[in-house]
Image: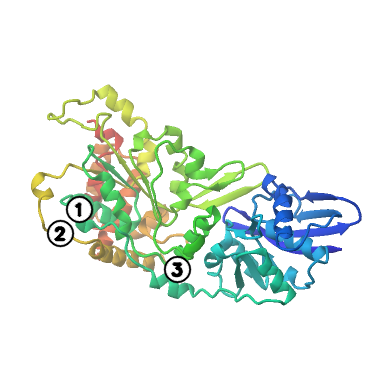
Amino acid sequence: MLVKVFGSAVFGVEATTVTVEVNIDKGIGYHLVGLPDNAIKESSYRIAAALKNNGYQLPGKKITINMAPADLRKEGSAYDLTLAMGILVASGQIQSGEVDKYIIMGELSLDGSLQPIRGALPIAIKAKEEGFKGFFLPKQNVKEAAIVSGLDVYGIENVQEIIDFFEGKGTIEPTIFDTREEFYKTLDFPEYDFSDVKGQESIKRCMEIAAAGGHNLILIGPPGAGKTMLAKRLPSILPPMTLREALETTKIHSVVGKIKEAGLMNQRPFRSPHHTISNVALVGGGSYPQPGEISMAHNGVLFLDELPEFKREVLEVMRQPLEDREVTISRAKFTVTYPSSFMLVASMNPSPSGFFNDPGSPNTSSPNEMNRYLSKISGPLLDRIDIHIEVTPVPFEKLSDDRKAESSSSIRQRVTQARELQTVRFTENEKVNYNAQMNTKQIREFCVLDENSKQLLKSAMERLNLSARAYDRILKVSRTIADLENSENVLSHHIAEAIQYRSLDRDGWLG
């Protein structure tokens, strides 16, 4: 008897439906075809034990299973339940004409219980698109899949539950998840707050500008000046995620298997990889591609602490994703694209010893050591960072001050108002949501300068020897400063402030 059941394979952040054809005939053997990986080939042992422990059996006949499309590589143990249901129906152990109307996915334990899978959200989206009646999956993943409305999503704990459902012996209620209600109900602030930070007013101002326009930022200062502490508080002043951004972010984390019980993500991600990270782990890839840290930080913050400690080739692979806001990984047989629209926040010491031109420091670095240390970061990468700011240690008087600083919520309010202006400005362009994403054409349209501002920018360009890309960055940052002041035009004092944030460019740093 020939039976068709349906599973799904995830490539990039999209799913592809996989048709599992099970044919049972006279003879002996178990043949699994359709480019399965080792985890799927081993499934026969898990399926046999799970069925036996629940009162069923793997038939002692010739079982041929084809996973179509046959030229698409399938990976992972999530097809266990799909294969098991196909075998049960094809061998006549259960009677059901409905099994082909559902997507069935789950990893089987030997006792028949189910383990969580990856990519439940993209699979559910594809199942709805293709008109399937419902989706059976492990209970641990049910919240993320139930985000998709118009699809019956059933969370099950063991194989017996799904068998009873198809035989009409038991009922399983589909999980209902009110996406909007859940999204707004649990919308709260991160644990870190700017009210805990003493002094550092100029750095807070920088971070407010960066958050308002989505600009990349680098903090340069000696050890203990508070660079990491400030960076960790940046997500607390970013505007709340929109529902669309939350769905995009959840989709990526679902592919990596990081959602499970959480359902919809509503906090902007903050990723802080260690400096020993490889370029594949940072941008994504591998023989069977997975999203990297830059995609995990999509719609959030990627924090690179001690930037010069990262391998140079690791930092260089970020250059293209920083511009394009997506990363494309190509292999001989397929290409996958992951979104990577993130805010890059980096920190570094000004020299190998950590102290730069500090007469009180016992170990200052020589100019040669300085050059060697700073050469780890290329000019083109620094060009892509909009705001460079020097962080100085906080004096004792401010550290011991008992007064609370301005809270993250009040800064966030100003940031959100500035973002709302940008949302209105870029209504007609779907790919641009905030100032940092503007292309050259939009910069010319929305950053019109008067004669004073042009002269000021010209002298700064010549004095600091800035590139054309740095010129665009200054205009973008000045547009954000104007938005924070609710100013329709970019004025000379906006340009002057934006120029200050390029003072650590490579040509001006040692001079």
Front one among 417 and 431: 417
Label 2 belongs to which residue? 404
Label 3 belongs to which residue? 243
Q: Secondary structure at mark 3?
A: helix
Q: Is residue 437 above or below residue 346?
A: below
Q: Quadrant of residue 366?
A: top left
> Which mark's residue is nearer the viewer, 2 or 3?
2
Q: Which mark is residue 197?
A: 1
Q: Is residue 409 above or below residue 61?
A: below
Identify the coloring. Answer: rainbow
How far from the left and from the top, in percent, is residue 5? 74, 64
Residue at x-position 49% and y-position 60% = 250
Distance (Cα) linking label 1 and label 3: 31 Å
Dot 2 alpha-carbon crowd within 10 angstroms: few under 14, some 14 to 19, many 20 or more: few
Distance (Cα) linking label 1 and label 2: 8 Å
Classify residue 288 as left or right of residue 487: right
Dot 3 alpha-carbon crowd within 10 angstroms: few under 14, some 14 to 19, many 20 or more: some
How far from the left and from the top, in percent, is residue 488? 27, 65
Front one among 335 and 392: 392
Dot 1 alpha-carbon crowd within 10 angstroms: few under 14, some 14 to 19, many 20 or more: many
Q: Secondary structure at mark 1?
A: loop
